[in-house]
Image (spheres, helix red, strand yellow):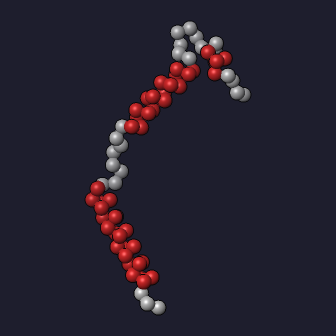
Amino acid sequence: MILDPMSLTYLTRVGEPTPEARFREEFERSKHERSAPAAELVEPEQRKAASLLRARVIVSIGRFFARPA
């Protein structure tokens, strides 16, 4: 069942915020939470080691395909 947002205003109690105001508050709160810097999931040393390993694998594959047949 789809209701018009304006009709929901009549269902709220006196002094209670409208559904639009509640949604706006929740949206702003979640936007601030998302913009907060998140903790690093991977340590920088492990990230660097993984990057170097990836580069070595790419070079090895390149050498494999570049060798004469």
Up the image or down, 58 lies above or below 18; here it is below
Give the tally of numbered discs. Answer: 0
In this rendering, is residue 53 above or below 23?
below
Residue positioned 40% across, 32% down in the render? 32
Residue found 49% across the figure and 29% down from its top:
27
Instruction: Pick out the residue farthest to the left.
Output: 45
Left or right: where does residue 4 sit relative to residue 48?
A: right
Q: Residue drawn 56% across and 8% down? A: 14
Q: Nearer the viewer, residue 36 or 68?
A: 68
- The quadrant in which the N terminus is found is top right
The residue lying toward the viewer, choosing from 56 and 41, is 56
- Position of residue 41 measured from the top left corner of the image (x, y, whole percent): 36, 51
Q: Position of residue 36 (x, y in %)?
A: 36, 37
Looking at this view, name the residue that lies furthest to the bottom: 69
Residue 25 in the image, given as x and y percentages of width and height: 47, 24
Q: Is residue 47 above or below residue 11?
A: below
Q: Is residue 22 above or below residue 37?
A: above
Residue furthest to the top: 14
Task: Tell me which residue sits at (37%, 76%) in the image.
Answer: 59
